[in-house]
Amino acid sequence: MPRILCVDDDEETASLLAEALVDLGYTVELASDGEAGLSAIQMSPPDLVLCDVRMPGMNGLDLLEQLAATAPHLARIPFVFLTALDDRGSEIAARRKGADDYLTKPVDFEMLAVVVEHRLRAGRGGQSQDALGHLTGREREVLTWASRGKTSAEIALILDLRERTVNFHFDQAMKRLNVVNRTHAVARALSLRLID
């Protein structure tokens, strides 16, 4: 069972995240700040880290930077930032330091579930599982509906998802298929017989 470390100084948010992740079948440990998170990662490396960006003392960016400097092998653990900042600058800074994903608060738990599942799968299998031609079931679904001329909003209604989640699946499919837009993703998926 994958183990997730949640580093957040907001107890209420941390407990909500833990509850949601436990319901999804993960083991969850909590750390109340960056220093505690760093110590927890070094003592017993988790399978994935969910980390708030803004915390007193060592913030999330500092934590990731410290890991990269002192234990590069631990910096390869999938790292997902959570923050109340809907700020492109913070996201870019996080990604430059090696963050795998970046989600804003209040947390969309459906999106969190998708991101965590994807990052754990990628972390276990590395590039081989994300190689060209591999799509998740949900990615195949959104591309199939797109091939039938449906928009993101229509696909969201059909699949009972949020439009934002549909767009996330499109983005992931485009990355996996190494294309720059949805039309090319559909064409590539069809040519590889990943969708009908």
Image (cartoon, rainbow, N blue to C red):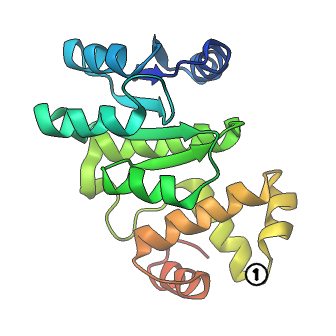
* Horizontal side, residue 142 vs residue 98: left or right: right
**Residue at the (53%, 44%) spot, across then down:** 115
**Residue at the (38%, 22%) spot, across then down:** 34
Residue 71 seen by the camera: no
Q: Quadrant of residue 20?
A: top right
Neighbours of disc 1 within 10 Å: few (<14), some (14-19), many (20+):
few
Numbered-mark total: 1
Q: Is residue 98 above or below residue 13?
A: below
Quarter the C terminus occupies: bottom right
Q: Position of residue 154 (x, y in %)?
A: 86, 69
**Residue at the (45%, 82%) spot, across then down:** 179
Quarter the N terminus occupies: top left
Q: Residue furthest front?
A: 57
Q: Where is residue 140 in the image (x, y as percent from the top left)?
A: 59, 64
* Horizontal side, residue 151 vs residue 118: left or right: right
Report the amino acid beneath label 1: Arg
* Horizontal side, residue 81 vs residue 148: left or right: left
* Horizontal side, residue 157 vs residue 196: left or right: right
Camera-side residue: 91 or 176? 91
> Which residue is tagged 1?
148
